[in-house]
């Protein structure tokens, strides 16, 4: 059982029975993710566009190794204010500094150790074992805090967030209650370490007693026969499997040891009761939230190692003049880098009155990837995270929508077209001028003429809304609806019309020559086919 | 406790790597005959004799040689006592094998079997002490004196009492273990303890409680298993210590077995040669001398020849002090090879600390003993015969050191006399200048002649003697080389007519 976080505050598992959960009086409003914790809108569900943009895969991979921190909800909740984004950018800049990264790393490692021990203190059956693990968890906690106070004391972070943490931790580390907690823990650990007892086993009877300096029989044997020892000897010692849980006999023995040392074990039990919520909520929260940054950084680490460019984008909540240079789809890139394949980067720009990128061109040419990249970049930017681009200036939308071609749903009573229209209608009802929409091969399930008419109508509505949109389509005419649209095309190699370059560039749509070239390559061109069949 | 009957400081290592030319030595010096006589049919005696004899090529310290000679003397003087000690060692080793079986399962069974081994070994050690008590005074060699006094010093009566006490404690059904609390309050540092005697405990603190107890129910299988595991953990280290201790004592008995086997072999050989009426003597060994090498003998014979013919053989005298090169020429089948072998075996046996087949023998110890005999034509016809000879000599050159001994029998005869002489001249010059002693049997007259007419203070010329009537004598005497090897005698014998 992993220590699971709830969406609100974390409370550690208690060992003793009785006392109900109680909120501490201490203010846990400090957060390394939000300048003002009230800013949190508590969106705990996956946004609708996640699946289309493959962001679901990204979050799944990231949280795979970090289950206990319940990170997905942070990835679901975009920021809307550049100041909030800047708050996070500052933290990332700090994490780029070796001393700070090391200090944070050491802290989360020790806290992980603490959580492992807390797990054991919940899992094992024997109460005296649980108490000991709880003590060990508290010990790890004190070590983590102390070390963090020292480490942060030696550097001055640049971010408001980490400066706040520093102030808090140093003060907390010196607070009388922490100092006392640490002293009590150390005392108990020392005394427990000094306990020595004997077990006498005869038949089915076990007798436990204090140790009275009886002689070490193994040592006696070794000394007696030392005179015969000339060379190194073979080791016959058996190895035993170690289990965390005591078996029944070991439990009974432990119980008798406790009876022989009633004061010490009594104090141990009391400690567990009194300090059930030793864990400071601010630090607990920090321990969880910092993993939002750390896990993402770990996710993009192999990409950076392969030379993929990342940057902290400039963001704005009013200017829709967006651009990016050398940008990539982060999820696809991660897969391809793992296979040693080079990934093509692309640029985009919307300037002046431009709001809609209409992307046409040959199939499998990278149009869908391009549209995903556009969406991903914006969402990651809204999370305050580095984006895979050399340079980027992006918009913070109030909402983001996606409209991708879906498989026909046999259970649906609607036709595919109807279903798509219903969806796009819903989107347009909810969207505002500050929204972003990514459309991919919409309205493909109808005639070209109808697709043109529907597409034009929808696009005109989008233009009216003045929202940013990427529209991947085979309907070339849509790229010329007015000054609000900008035409881009996926391209093929000049010397071989059947080879995709995966570069998507700004140029006017220029028809379907490529499909024909591809057909001819397969000897399916009109003349070719006639010749082949006539033979 | 080391046995140290072969060397004041080092036990004999049966597994030591033999010298690189072991096979050649065995073949050229007929060592199988010698080893066979030492072993007298016993495979272990053979193995030890072989290792010891081959290993002696590296023994150059006269102190070690003397040490062994004295032990040989004691062995021969007290054969019954030696047999008895040898028998005790054999019983210890065989008995142990019966107890030990094939490996072990649990700490409990490891402990139980190891305690049985200890019981056996303690009995055998007591028997050794008894022998020491009865006979130690009659032994004169440093080797045996130190062996017996070691036994007496290291194994006093109270030692056996202490061992018995610990063994008894380890056999008791009740065991006591101390422990501490580790992570999660798991028991750690299980250490087996000897409990204080009841009477002590009461005196220490009469009001102390006797500990807290519980009992596992009769039908509780899991509980019984838990107790088993607890006991196994408790005795794990002790069981290992006892097993290792038994191993150490076994190693002691094995060492005793091995070293006595050598001396039994020497005694066997001595007896065989005496029965044939052949003399043996304790040779005199001096330190390896490159400048003034020593080699002198009276009545030196080839023991392997005597054993093979099962009868008496001729001995020869030799005055080789100060000579780094001995050249032996003369009649075919005149005894040159036999003489060469006699010298080689004597050197080997001297360094092994044994007696030598002669009336008297004295030599400096040589650092490595090598042979270069002529061989059958190379069967795979890859090399010519000369090629093969040079190849072999080159291999030997790799191992030769200043202070080595080289016995050469008809080397470089596989080419014409001129060429062979020139090659040999260079080889001999180089070797002797480096301090290698060479005994060189040859028909190369050109070489022998040139050596004889030049300055030759350090060369001894010997000739296989031919009587007036042409009969062989198998005697070798000082004499300059003659241009003929009396092939006419052999020709006449075979063809029944004279050689023109």
Image: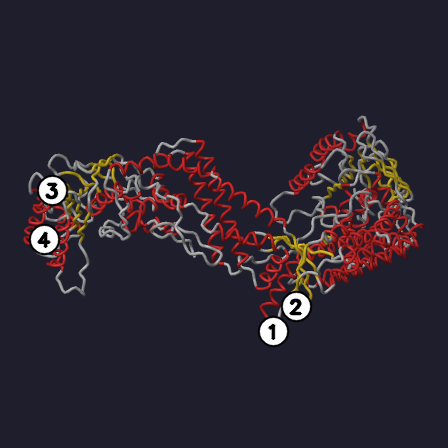
Image spot of residue A77 (x, y percent): 27, 47
User: Observer-nearest residue: B65 or A441?
Assistant: A441
Identify residue for label 4: A526
Q: Nearer the viewer, mark 2 or mark 4?
A: 2
Residue at left offset 46%, top offset 35%? A151
Identify residue for label 2: A204
User: Observer-nearest residue: A73 or B305?
Assistant: A73
Q: Are marks 1 and 4 on the same chain?
A: no
Q: Nearer the viewer, mark 3 or mark 2?
A: 2
Question: Is there a contact, CB below 8 Å, between mark 3 and mark 1?
Answer: no
Q: Nearer the viewer, mark 1 or mark 4?
A: 1
Question: Is there a contact, CB below 8 Å, between mark 2 and mark 4?
Answer: no
Question: Is there a contact, CB below 8 Å, between mark 1 and mark 4?
Answer: no
Question: Is there a contact, CB below 8 Å, between mark 1 and mark 2?
Answer: no
Identify residue for label 1: B219
- Chain under label 2? A
Density class for disc 2 (Cα within 10 Å; few <14, some 14-19, many ≥20) is some
Identify residue for label 3: A466
- Chain under label 1? B
Q: Nearer the viewer, mark 3 or mark 4?
A: 3
- Chain under label 4? A
Q: Could you give the CA–CA distance between mark 3 and mark 4, rounded to whole angstroms? A: 45 Å
- Chain under label 3? A
Q: Is residue A101 left or right of residue B17?
A: left
Among the 4 quarters of the image, the one containing residue B359: top right
Residue at left offset 32%, top offset 45%? A334
Q: Could you give the CA–CA distance between mark 1 and mark 2, rounded to whole angstroms? A: 11 Å
Q: Are marks 1 and 2 on the same chain?
A: no
Q: Is label 2 in a helix, a strand or a loop?
A: loop
Q: Is residue B416 left or right of residue A246?
A: right
Q: Is label 3 in a helix, a strand or a loop?
A: loop
Image spot of residue A13 (x, y percent): 44, 54
């Amino acid at each position: 059982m992993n220590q699971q976080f709830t969406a609100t505050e974390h409370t550690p598992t208690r060992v003793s029975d009785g006392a109900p959960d109680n909120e501490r009086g201490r203010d846990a409003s400090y957060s390394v993710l939000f300048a003002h914790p009230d800013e949190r809108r508590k969106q705990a569900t996956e946004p609708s566009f996640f699946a289309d943009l493959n962001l679901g895969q990204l979050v799944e991979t990231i949280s795979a190794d970090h289950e206990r921190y319940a990170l997905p909800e942070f990835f679901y909740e975009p920021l809307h204010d550049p100041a909030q984004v800047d708050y996070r950018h500052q933290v990332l800049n700090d994490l780029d500094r070796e001393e700070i990264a090391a200090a944070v790393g050491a802290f989360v490692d020790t806290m992980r150790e603490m959580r492992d021990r807390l797990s054991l203190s919940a899992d094992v059956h024997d109460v005296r074992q649980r108490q000991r693990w709880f003590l060990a968890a508290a010990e790890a906690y004190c070590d983590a805090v102390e070390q963090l106070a020292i480490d942060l004391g030696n550097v001055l972070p640049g971010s408001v967030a980490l400066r706040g943490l520093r102030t808090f931790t140093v003060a907390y580390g010196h607070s009388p209650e922490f100092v006392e907690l640490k002293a009590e823990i150390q005392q108990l650990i020392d005394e427990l370490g000094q306990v020595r007892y004997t077990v006498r086993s005869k038949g089915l009877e076990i007798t436990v007693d204090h140790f009275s300096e009886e002689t070490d029989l193994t040592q006696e044997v070794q000394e007696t026969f030392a005179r015969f020892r000339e060379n190194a000897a073979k080791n016959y010692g058996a190895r035993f499997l170690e289990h965390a849980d005591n078996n029944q006999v070991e439990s009974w023995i432990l119980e008798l040891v406790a009876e022989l040392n009633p004061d010490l074990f009594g104090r141990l039990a009391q400690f567990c009761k009194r300090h059930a919520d030793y864990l400071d909520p601010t630090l607990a929260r920090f321990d969880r939230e910092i993993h939002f940054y750390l896990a993402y950084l770990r996710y993009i680490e192999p990409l950076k190692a392969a030379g993929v460019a990342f940057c902290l984008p400039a963001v704005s909540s009013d200017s829709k003049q967006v651009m990016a240079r050398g940008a990539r789809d982060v999820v696809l890139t991660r897969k391809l880098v793992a296979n040693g394949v080079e990934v093509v980067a692309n640029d985009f720009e919307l300037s002046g009155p431009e709001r809609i990128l209409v992307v046409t061109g040959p199939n499998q040419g990278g149009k869908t990837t391009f549209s995903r990249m556009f969406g991903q970049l914006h969402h990651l930017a809204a999370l305050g995270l580095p984006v895979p681009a050399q340079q980027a200036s992006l918009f913070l939308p109030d909402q983001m929508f996606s409209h991708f071609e879906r498989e026909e749903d046999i259970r649906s009573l609607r036709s595919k077209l109807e279903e798509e229209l219903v969806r796009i209608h819903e989107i347009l009802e909810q969207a505002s001028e500050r929204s972003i929409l990514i459309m991919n091969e919409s309205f493909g399930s109808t005639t070209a003429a109808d697709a043109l008419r529907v597409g034009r109508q929808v696009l005109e509505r989008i233009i009216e809304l003045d929202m940013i949109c990427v529209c991947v389509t085979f309907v070339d005419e849509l790229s010329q609806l007015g000054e609000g649209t900008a035409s881009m095309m996926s391209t093929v190699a000049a010397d071989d019309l059947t080879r995709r370059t995966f570069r998507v560039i700004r140029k006017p749509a220029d028809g379907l020559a490529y499909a024909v070239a591809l057909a001819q390559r397969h000897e399916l061109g009109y003349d070719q086919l006639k010749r082949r069949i006539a033979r | 406790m080391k046995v140290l009957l072969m060397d004041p400081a080092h036990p004999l290592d049966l597994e030591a790597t033999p010298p690189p030319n072991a096979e050649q030595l065995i073949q050229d010096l007929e060592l199988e005959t010698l080893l066979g006589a030492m072993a007298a049919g016993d495979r272990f005696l053979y193995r030890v004799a072989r290792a010891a004899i081959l290993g002696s090529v590296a023994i150059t310290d006269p102190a070690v040689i003397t040490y062994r000679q004295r032990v040989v003397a004691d062995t021969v003087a007290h054969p019954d006592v030696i047999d008895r000690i040898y028998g005790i060692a054999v019983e210890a080793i065989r008995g142990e094998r019966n107890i030990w079986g094939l490996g072990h399962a649990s700490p409990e069974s490891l402990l139980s079997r190891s305690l049985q081994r200890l019981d056996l070994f303690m009995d055998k050690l007591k028997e050794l002490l008894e022998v020491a008590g009865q006979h130690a005074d009659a032994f004169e060699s440093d080797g045996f004196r130190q062996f017996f006094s070691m036994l007496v010093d290291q194994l006093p009566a109270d030692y056996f009492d202490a061992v018995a006490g610990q063994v008894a404690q380890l056999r008791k059904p009740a065991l006591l273990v101390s422990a501490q609390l580790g992570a999660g309050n798991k028991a750690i540092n299980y250490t087996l303890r000897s409990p204080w005697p009841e009477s002590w405990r009461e005196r220490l603190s009469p009001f102390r409680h006797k500990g807290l107890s519980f009992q596992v129910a009769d039908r509780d299988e899991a509980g019984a298993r838990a107790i088993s595991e607890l006991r196994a953990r408790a005795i794990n280290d002790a069981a290992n210590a006892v097993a290792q201790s038994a191993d150490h004592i076994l190693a002691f008995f094995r060492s005793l077995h091995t070293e006595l086997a050598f001396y039994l072999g020497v005694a066997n050989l001595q007896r065989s040669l005496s029965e044939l009426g052949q003399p043996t003597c304790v040779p005199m060994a001096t330190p390896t001398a490159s400048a003034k090498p020593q080699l002198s003998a009276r009545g030196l014979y080839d023991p392997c020849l005597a054993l093979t013919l099962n009868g008496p053989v001729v001995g020869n005298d030799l005055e080789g002090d100060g000579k780094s090169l001995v050249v032996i020429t003369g009649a075919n089948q005149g005894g040159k090879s036999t003489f060469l072998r006699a010298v080689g075996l004597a050197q080997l046996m001297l360094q092994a600390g044994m007696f030598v087949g002669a009336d008297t023998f004295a030599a400096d110890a040589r650092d490595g003993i090598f042979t270069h005999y002529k061989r059958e034509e190379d069967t795979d016809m890859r090399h010519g015969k000369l090629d093969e000879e040079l190849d072999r000599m080159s291999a030997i050159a790799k191992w030769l050191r200043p202070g080595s001994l080289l016995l050469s029998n008809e080397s470089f005869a596989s080419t014409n006399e001129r060429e062979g002489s020139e090659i040999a001249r260079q080889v001999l010059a180089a070797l002797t200048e480096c301090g290698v002693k060479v005994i060189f049997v040859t028909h190369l007259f050109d070489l022998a002649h040139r050596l004889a007419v030049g300055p030759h203070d350090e060369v001894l010329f010997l000739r296989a003697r031919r009587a007036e009537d042409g009969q062989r004598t198998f005697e070798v005497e000082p004499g300059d080389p003659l241009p003929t090897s009396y092939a006419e005698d052999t020709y006449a014998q075979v063809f029944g007519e004279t050689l023109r």
